[in-house]
Image: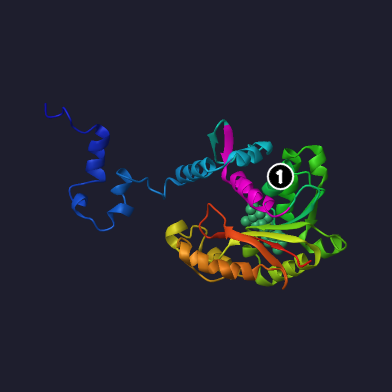
Amino acid sequence: MADKYGGSTLWDTYHRTRITKESSVDLAGFKSAGVNFKLALWNPRTNGVRYLKSLIYNVADGLDDAGWQRLRRIGGRETGAPIAVRIHGELVCMDYLQAVLELEFMERHVALDGGTVLEIGAGYGRTCHAVLANHDVAGYYIVDLENSLDLARAYLREVLDADDFAKVRFVPAGDLEETLAGLRFDLCLNIDSFAEMDAEVVRNYLAFVARHCRHLYVKNPVGKYLDPSLDDHAEGQELVAMALRTGLLRDVIDIHDSEVVRVQSAKFVDAYRPAAGWTDLADEWAPPWSYYWQALYRAAA
Ligand SMILES: C[S@@+](CC[C@H](N)C(=O)[O-])C[C@H]1O[C@@H](n2cnc3c(N)ncnc32)[C@H](O)[C@@H]1O
């Protein structure tokens, strides 16, 4: 009779090991520690993939019909085995989910069909892939450092059809001025990359954009952070110190305070304006990361 409503062996174990007689009367910090990780929350330190998948799931749930169509047009997203969830039968990972959101923002302000695009710092090429799958652009130039360029070339050869792949040009950063000297671009893109370059290099790129491009789309962090609770500084202090030194926006801020981010976003919009006279057509928070901002500028006529 005593066991009619008793705890399972699972809960007997929890009460022996986590929610013990001693811990159950100690309220100091219990919501962010082992006690609560068996009550209302999963331990974020050991459940990173679970939280990432939940985030993907929730962000994807906010896509409208046009967003789902943009995503479906991008074939071969399973290449490289991303961490992903499946919604409405569709494989969804954070990289292409963001690509769809970025594309949606750009499309509101620039006509991509028939245009020529320049992307600075393309990573493995997810944005190029998303743009080419959704628009009939005339040409897409990727400028990057050598190893990243090699990866993007291999990846895009795999996921794009031959006609689209033929539109992509891979330009080593060091050859930029020589290779692109006579060209004009309808749109230049920089996503999550200016903030990781030396400030002087960013200024050089912005000056190039001012001379060669009609629009600039930038999506980057609005500042730096120094909160070991986020990542235990797992990459080491040296890397943290390097990361703090890069980019135009080096203020250390609380990246999870919306008011701080909003105030900092004004500096973002000023910092990435390629030259005086360029108009900020639109700027806004770039979800899902709290401290990323996006802006689209147009050159003076
Ligand atoms: C964090 S990744 C972002 C990649 C991609 N935009 C994305 O969001 O998936 C930064 C990219 O910037 C590139 N990069 C870093 N320094 C660069 C430089 N000086 N010139 C051009 N690209 C650079 C890196 O090689 C990498 O491709």
Total count of labels: 1
Q: Is residue 103 magenta?
A: yes
Say above or below: 44 vs 57. Answer: below
Say above or below: 107 vs 12. Answer: below
- Residue located at (78% from left, 37% from top): 161
Q: Is residue 195 magenta?
A: no
Which quadrant would the N terminus be assigned to in this image?
top left
Magenta residues span: 90-110
Horizontal side of residue 8 vs 197, given as left or right: left
Which quadrant would the C terminus be assigned to in this image?
bottom right
Say above or below: 293 vs 43. Answer: below
What is the three-letter code of the residue carrying label 1? His
- Residue located at (51% from left, 40% from top): 61
Say above or below: 77 vs 43. Answer: above
Q: Magenta stretch mostly in which secondary structure?
A: helix
Q: Quadrant of ligand 1?
A: bottom right
Q: Quadrant of residue 232?
A: bottom left
**Residue 124 visible in image:** no
Horizontal side of residue 287 vs 28, given as left or right: right
**Residue 93 visible in image:** yes
Where's residue 19, x and y in %? Answer: 24, 46
Say which residue label 1 marks: 129
Q: Nearer the viewer, residue 274 or 119?
A: 274
Q: Nearer the viewer, residue 178 or 116?
A: 116
Where's residue 197, x and y in %? Answer: 65, 65
Label 1: state its secondary structure.
helix
Horizontal side of residue 186 vs 291, given as left or right: right
Residue at disc 1, CB closer than 8 Å to ligand 1 = no
- Residue located at (82% from left, 46% from top): 167
Where's residue 164, x and y in %? Answer: 79, 42
Horizontal side of residue 31 vs 193, given as left or right: left
